[in-house]
């Protein structure tokens, strides 16, 4: 059960393990073909540039779940926001409270860091996860849509002349 799990922050020696969890999550959400990250990129961005952090749930010396998170800032509240980018518990360990434990540990980290909230995304079709989050008291932000620029669209936007971008 959850009370016999420990939590630890990832170190650079966990780079391969982090990639394993990222790939397992991507496979679970049917997006494995989108994973292009390498161990070198993880090492650089997480442990050299410190752009994100990883928390592991550990049961009997075995990592059973992970969360990759970083901080944003809320201009309305004037407080940081802990953004949960990736969250995954290995299938054979689900139903034992480890996911709830990871979120609880992240909530403690958020509060200790002065955060006003935690935030994350969930795929619309992932009903078990949605039900789980709602059961914890999370709410769906229905008045927001997620937008992103990537690939050619991102490059095109970056190449726009600055005066053209300022005009509209």
Image (cartoon, rainbow, N blue to C red):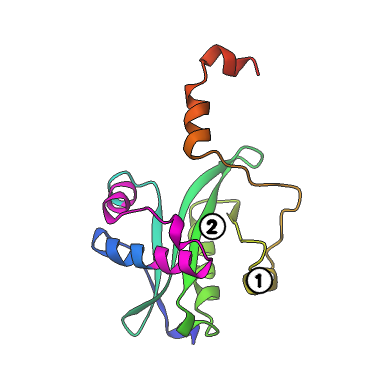
> How many C-alpha atoms fall within 10 Å of the one at disc 2: few (<14), some, or many (≥20)?
some
Q: Residue at x 71, y 61 (%)?
A: 139
For label 2, the SS is helix
Q: Which residue is mark 2?
A: 111
Image spot of residue 91 (x, y percent): 48, 80
Q: Which residue is mark 1?
A: 136
For label 1, the SS is loop
The answer to whether 102 is drawn above or below residue 94 in the figure is above
| CA separation in Å, label 2 and label 1 | 17 Å
Choose top left, top right, bottom left or bottom right for residue 4: bottom left
Q: Residue at x 58, y 14 (%)?
A: 164
Q: Which mark is residue 90?
A: none
- Please provide the residue range marked out in magenta: 21-46
Choose top left, top right, bottom left or bottom right for residue 137: bottom right
Image spot of residue 86 (x, y percent): 48, 60
Q: Residue at x 32, y 43 (%)?
A: 49
| Quadrant into which the C terminus falls | top right
Q: Give the left or right position of residue 12, taking residue 149 as reference.
A: left
* Residue 68 appears in the picture as rendered: no
Image spot of residue 92 (x, y percent): 46, 84
Q: Residue at x 53, y 34 (%)?
A: 153
> How many C-alpha atoms fall within 10 Å of the one at disc 1: few (<14), some, or many (≥20)?
few
Image spot of residue 85 (x, y percent): 50, 56
Q: Nearer the viewer, residue 4 or 19?
A: 19
């Amino acid at each position: 059960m959850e009370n016999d799990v420990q939590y630890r922050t990832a170190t650079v020696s966990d780079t391969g393990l982090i990639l394993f969890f990222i790939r397992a999550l991507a496979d679970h959400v049917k997006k494995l073909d989108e994973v292009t990250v390498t161990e070198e990129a993880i090492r650089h961005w997480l442990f050299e540039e410190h752009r994100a952090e990883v928390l592991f749930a550990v049961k009997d010396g075995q990592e059973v779940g992970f969360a990759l998170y970083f901080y944003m800032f809320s201009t309305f509240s004037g407080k940081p926001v802990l953004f949960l980018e990736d969250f995954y518990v290995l299938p054979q360990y689900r139903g034992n409270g480890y996911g709830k434990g990871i979120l609880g540990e992240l909530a403690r980290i958020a509060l200790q860091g002065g955060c006003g909230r935690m935030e994350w995304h969930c795929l619309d079709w992932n009903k078990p996860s949605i039900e789980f989050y709602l059961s914890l008291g999370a709410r769906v932000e229905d008045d927001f849509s997620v937008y992103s620029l990537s690939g050619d669209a991102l490059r095109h936007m970056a190449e726009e002349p600055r005066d053209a971008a300022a005009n509209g």
